[in-house]
């Protein structure tokens, strides 16, 4: 359930409780409080503007799983997952990450170079 903040409308007629402001846990469908529960003077709901800062692209569940594998040193698992996701989403960053993780897992791509054959 959400928590709502309330404050007195008239500071001169209010008690310390509503003058300083207080919080109330209410269901979203409940009507807002209109009177202070202690002094019965008028109160109003205080609205807050949320501060949200998003940098870069959103992290997906697959990104989290890849990072978890990398943290645990499971490079081949991380590489395979990144490789599959890069194929589906055409994300270049995941393709590069997959190659780096394959190298950390011990794969040597130079010996598979088709120009040598």
Image (cartoon, rainbow, N blue to C red):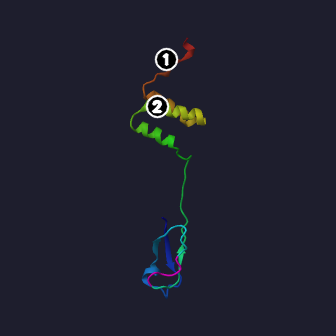
Q: Position of residue 115 (x, y in %)?
A: 57, 15
Q: Is residue 58 left or right of residue 21?
A: right
Q: Is residue 23 above or below residue 95?
A: below
For image coordinates 46% across by 72% down, the residue present is 24
In 3D space, how far apart are the residues under numbered discs 2 and 1 (Cα atoms)? 17 Å
Is residue 43 or residue 97 the one in the foreground? 43
Is residue 89 or residue 36 the one in the foreground? 36
Q: Position of residue 107 (x, y in %)?
A: 45, 24
What residue would you read off at disc 2? 101
Q: Position of residue 97 (x, y in %)?
A: 51, 34
Q: Position of residue 32 (x, y in %)?
A: 54, 74
For image coordinates 46% across by 77% down, the residue present is 21
Which is more N-terminal, label 1 or label 2?
2
Magenta-highlighted stretch: main secondary structure? Answer: loop
Element carrying mark 1 = helix
> In this picture, which residue range is highlighted in magenta?
33-38
Is the residue under label 1 in contact with that under label 2 (CB below 8 Å)?
Answer: no
For image coordinates 49% across by 65% down, the residue present is 2
Q: Is residue 107 above or below residue 95?
A: above
Residue 36 belongs to magenta span: yes
Q: Which mark is residue 66?
A: none
Is residue 30 or residue 73 the one in the foreground? 30
Q: Residue furthest left?
A: 72
For image coordinates 50% across by 32% down, the residue present is 98
Can you say which quadrant of the picture contains the C terminus?
A: top right
Q: Which mark is residue 111?
A: 1
């Amino acid at each position: 359930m959400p928590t709502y903040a309330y404050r007195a409308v008239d500071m001169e007629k209010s008690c310390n409780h509503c003058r300083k402001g207080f919080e109330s846990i209410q269901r979203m469908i409940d009507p807002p409080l209109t009177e202070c529960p202690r002094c019965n003077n008028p109160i109003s709901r205080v609205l807050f503007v949320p501060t949200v800062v998003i940098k870069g692209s959103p992290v997906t569940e697959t990104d989290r799983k890849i990072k978890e594998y990398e943290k645990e040193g499971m490079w081949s698992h991380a590489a395979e997952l990144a490789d599959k996701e890069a194929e589906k989403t055409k994300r270049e960053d995941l393709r590069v990450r997959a190659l780096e993780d394959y190298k950390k897992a011990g794969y040597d791509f130079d010996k598979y170079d088709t120009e040598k054959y």
